[in-house]
Every structure is written in C-alpha cells, then in structure tokens.
Amino acid sequence: MISRRRAGLAYSIGTLISLGIIAILSACGGGGGGGSTTPPSIADLSYSPTAVPATGAGTFTVNGSITFSDAGGDLATLTMRITDATGATVSSATSPIQGIAGQTSGTIVGSVLATRPGVGAYTIHISVSDQAGAASNELSGPFDVVAAASQGRLVAATGPGPASLQVTNGKVYWSETGTTALRSVATSGGTVADLATRVVQIQAFAFVGSDLIWEDDRPMIGSAICGTDTRQRVIHRTSSAGVTTVLASGLICAPFTGSDIAVDATSVYWISSTLSPNVYVLNATPLAGGPTTTITSSLTPIAALAAGTSALYWMENAFPDPGVIRRRATATGTIDTVVSFASSVANTFAVDAANVYYTTANFPRTPSPTETLVAQPLAGGSAQTLSGAILAPIKLVAAGGQLAWIDDVALNAISTAGGSITQLASFAPNKALDLMVSGSNALWTETTGAGHGETGTVKSVPLAGGSVAVLVQGGDAPRRLALDSQARVNWTEGGAIGLTEGFSRVAALTGGSVQTVLSGISTQAPVFAVTATDVLVADLWRIKRVPLSGGMPETVAADDGPIAGVATDDAWAYWNRADRVSARKAPIGGGAVTVLADQGAALPLSNSPIRLGLNANLYWVTSSSALVSAPTAGGALGVVAQSASRCFVIDADNAYFDSATGSISKQPLSGAAPTVLASGGSCIDSASGPPMLSPFALNSQYLYWLGPLAGMDTVSKVSVSGGRVVPVLAFDGATGSSGASLAADATSVYWTQPTALEIRASDR
C-alpha cells in the first residue's frame, strides 16, 4: 500500500505528502520469468488507523498492507485513490513498488504521511499494475476524519457534573451535581430552565421578609479535603417565587462545628471550620449577595449563634474546657466578651434585652449530671443563678419574661427573674429536638420512633402551663423551627435519616394544613424519567415528581431501601432496587407501593437503570450481570441474558449492551441468541459506584455509544441492523469523555462534556 521509505510523491487525502512502496515477500513467493498476460491480483487490505480526529498535528501517518499474486513476476506500480462520501475522487496517485522484481506473490507494506483533511467519511481505493500496464482488481476501505466533540453544536452551558442526559418532547433534560439538581433546554438551544434545586441536609433557616435563608450541609463524595468526612456548607436565599441563589459556601472539617445561622438587616452569619489545627470561623455574608467576610475565628468550637436587636452573639464552647459568650455590636463592629465560664455541657444559650442565659457544669459529675442555670446582665455586673441543678438543656429560649428549655425528658420554664421551675411537657420515650416561642406558647419538635420511618410531631403548650396541642402529626422527621413574616410556624425535615433516605425540606403550617416552602433533590446528578407533565427522579430511597415547568419536588413513593433507576408510562412510576433483585411501582399521583417482583438481596449493589418495553415488561440488570424482566402487572421474573452490563438500552424488540466478551451485543428480548454489533464500549460498571450515567443512546436507526475506536475516545454509531461502525465525534483532553452521558433523537446525538461543562450535539 504505502511505503516506509516515503519516496517523494505528492498525494492527498486532504493532501498526501509522500507515498512509497516496499514489498515483503511471503515464504511461498518465488521468482518468475519473462512476464505474463494474466493481470495481477491483490487481497487482504489492512491499515491503521481507520480514523483520525479533525484536530491535532498537521500531519498523520497511516500504515497498511496488502497481499498480491502476479504470475508474470513483474509487478511495477501501486495506485491509491481517495473518494469522498459522494463518491467523487478527491485525490489519486501512482508510485513504483520497490524491491519486488521477479516475485510472483507476497505482501506489500508501507505508510503514507498525510495532511489533516476536513471532517468527513472517505474511502481508500488500492490497485496495482504490472510492467505491461495490466491492472489488478481494486480493494477499498473506509477512512473517517472525525469532528472534535468541542466542534459540535452548542446546546447549553451546564453546571458541575452534568449527567443522565435525556431527550424528549423537543427538549434536553439533565441532572447536575451542583446547586441546581435538574435542568432543561430546547434541543435547538436557548435559555436553560432550572427545574429543581439540590437540597441535601437543611441544618438551619431564617426568614428575611418573604425570602428564605437556609443552610445546607453536603457530603463531598470523592473528596478528602477534610479527610473521610468532608462536608460542604452552602448558604442559600430562596425567593417566594422559588428562585434560589447561592450566597456563600465553605468547608465543615472540624468536629463540633455549630450549625446555627443568624440574620440581621444586612447579613447572614454562619460557621465553617478547617483542620490541623482545628479552626472555627464565624462568617458574615451580605443578604443581597457579595463577598463573605470573617467576623472572628477560634480554636474552640463556635457552638451556637443568636442575633439580638443591636448585636450578634455566639458561644465558644468545648466541654470540659472553659468557654465564652461573645458579642459584636451591629453599629460599630466591636467585639467583646459578655461572659466567661469554667465549663458547660450545653451548647446553647439565650439572650433577651437584659441578659444572656446559659448553664455551667456541676462537679463532681453524677450518674445524672446537672448544670447550673445562670443569667448574666448584658450591661455587666454579677451573674444571677436561676437554678442550681437542671438537666443539661438541648435548647434555651428567652421570651416574654420567661426562660424555656428542653432537655432529654421534658420542656421546662422559669421566670427570667428566677423562681420555681414549671415542667410544661414530658417527652418520654421520645426526644425533643428544637424549641421556639410564638406569642404566649412554647413550640417544639419531637421524634416519634427512631430511625427509618420516623414520623415526628410539632407540638405547642402555653408558657403559663396547660394542655399540650399537637400541631402537626406524622411529618418526615421535623427538626428546626422558625416563624416566617406571617407568623406561621415553619420547620425543617430530614436530619441524618433524611440524608440517607433522600428527603429534606422546609414546611409551614397554613390554615391547619402543611405546605411545602422548600424542597429539592438530594442525590448528586440523579437518574430520572420524563412524562408528559413531570420529571420523575430517583432520589436515594424516594421517587419524586417535578413539574416540567419546574417547582418544588413532591414525593411520589417512599421505599425501604436505595432505588437504582426509574421508568414511567405517564400513569405509574416503576423502579428497581439497588439492594434487591426487585421491581416496584406506584401511581404518579401518589399511592401505595406495589412489589412486582422480588428475588431477595442483591450483593453487591446494582445501580442498573430500569427500562420499560413496549411489551409492558420492565428490564434491568442484576449484580450478577443478568438482564432480567418483570411484567408491569406483576408476575414471575424472567432472565433475558446472562452476561449484560448495566449500560444498556432497549427498543421494541431488542436490548443493546456491553457483554462479558467485550463486544456490544444485540439481544432479542424474546431471549433468542444475541448478535455482535461492534467491539466493546466503555461502560462505567462499578457495582459500588453511583447510579449509572448514559453511555448508550438509541434512536430508530442507530445505536450510539461511548468508547475507544481507532485509538481515539469517541462516540460511535452502528445501524441497529448491523454494519460498519462509524465514529461520530472524538473527545480530547480539554473536553474529556470521563463521565459523559449520551442521548439521541431522530436527527441528532447529544452528549455532555463534564470537563468543559457543556452539552453539545451533532446532526450527523
């Protein structure tokens, strides 16, 4: 074909720089004599690479070989012709074959150095001629010049970690790992719509007018900035219209970092921390947005915050070491110490116009250790002991001349002037979590049961004593309390259970009914399915529904374990479990969960997507690499294939997936024998990893996948009927294919570029 010696001959694919031929004779080849009237013949055309990216160095080399037979032993020249996709010849050249005189058979090997031509599909044609001019048969093969991924049509810029790409109803949908959890854009591009906010573990909240200020703590999966427990604290502002803005973020590295926030007319105050040494930082961020400043830092944990009418107060405390309560005057920014104390178990304090209230530890510590309740005048002077022996408070609140607190067993109150303690309510065997005062009543959140399935309550009792009223019964683990600008009771839900199971929100009691103020998606870049009206999201142990126009997610169904994938037929949500060989369903409008099939625990976990076939069967891949099916009406589990990857797609009759043999297989859903369509893709198939991305995509004509081809990292396609594999685009180091997702419609293939934070499309 093309020579290692590259004797000078101008040539072009674009433009072939040099072409030379050298023959390597086969062992059975032999000398010939005198010529022959029989034309030579050639076979076994082989060359590499078969494709190159459109970007890169100005020249590239293609190596190849053919075998020949020439009865006359007078093979003389080789001709290479290049045609484009229309069949038109774009270049042709002929060169002498060196070192072959008298040989009747053998192998010709060589190389060609070419300039990089334009994007397109080309065909290489090879023939040889003898000294009399008799031409051989012609061999041909494809050669692709592949567009770079970054040259695709820009559909949208994304946030961090775009994944789970889907195209339907003329729109592209995807999820992200950042603050915006779910987004969409028209397939033609345009304005990106934010459909749902990422809400992981709400720690604290407050209201500024009708806007919600909230603090969210997020485990940083895959990051070890703080060691194994690396968390990021994010401060948000959400308007009454549901638009969320990130005000600030910081790391929570050191243990015992407080979770309070406080707001005044201009700023939100919050706590972050770093390791080695453990440094706790009190931050101030403008409510209108802007740079965060440091109010103070301490080697002692900043355990609690409170905003007074003219100052910000905070407690630095780490039992059994000494602690302090400090304040910063709003008008001047001056920081002073209100009180120092020897030791306190309680990481809580309260403040009113006259005093700051806190407890100090009593020694020696008894089996039921107690604290001394103290009032320290803000103007200075001697502290007053209000009670010499109370259980350590979980939360202290001062209002209306009363000091109320919750401990492990009861809600108590005492006059801020001192006197006898009144027990207002008892919790046993439950636990109170937060406390506030609204008017003449004390309100608190209380657990009901523990762990999974916790259905907490919000309760109220008059500060003067009286009957306990249940305001909310059966919430999803209510935690922090606050009043909004309309004096409505608001609370957070979630906590550690919500972090595991995928729920955290702010709810309000409005006219006797519970209203969602803030909700979102917990999972980083979750998998989802799109209906005619909603997006259904698999969020840890829950299926949630988000309107196509965006809004606060609602829970469709809560399961008893982690959900892997979700599918829908616009009436039902279907899902499979990561920890069980099990498929389930629930009405999209909400209702009971139906178990369709369950064959027990799956070890290791399998985060396979689940697909709904036109035959009303569900398909997913188990941890043992079996492609299984279950009827949506319920019934026996069937096995379609034994060696499938979790990267798979289906059409009306077939499933397509990476197989154990390293090839891409087309598996009839009937269970008939599979066929091989292409060499393997690069399915990210780690059982311990996150829910699967989308490295396969399908339309009515082609299967697309992400994987290596001709030495490139490409998106390739093949006809669903089989045939030649065609590279569609090539990734480079700048755009990176790691973690990319694919989707396809009738006209285009779409892909995410996680490094460049883009979604692009090719109409090829």
Image: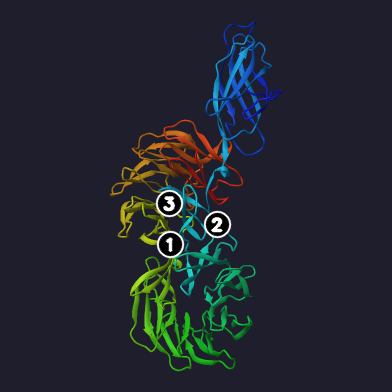
From the viewer's side, name the closer residue of 500 and 715.
715
How packed mark 3 is, by other alpha carbons closer than 10 Å (few <14, some 14-19, many 20 or more), is some
Q: Quadrant of the N terminus?
A: top right
Q: Judge whether residue 428 can be spotted in this image.
A: no
The answer to whether 347 is drawn above or below residue 712 in the figure is below
- Left of 198 or right of it: where is 76? right
Q: Which residue corresponds to mark 1?
A: 502
Q: Position of residue 314 (x, y in %)?
A: 57, 80
- In which image quadrant can residue 139 be found? top right
| Mark number, residue 222 | 2
Identify the secondary structure beneath mark 3: loop
Query: Which residue corresponds to the image point at 59% horizontal and 16% vertical from the top-left?
Result: 68
Question: Which amino acid type corresponds to the residue marked 1 in the rendered image?
Answer: Gly
Q: Which residue corresponds to mark 3?
A: 603
Q: Position of residue 344 (x, y in %)?
A: 54, 82
In this rendering, which labeled residue sits more in front, label 2 or label 3?
Answer: 2
Q: Position of residue 469 (x, y in %)?
A: 33, 80
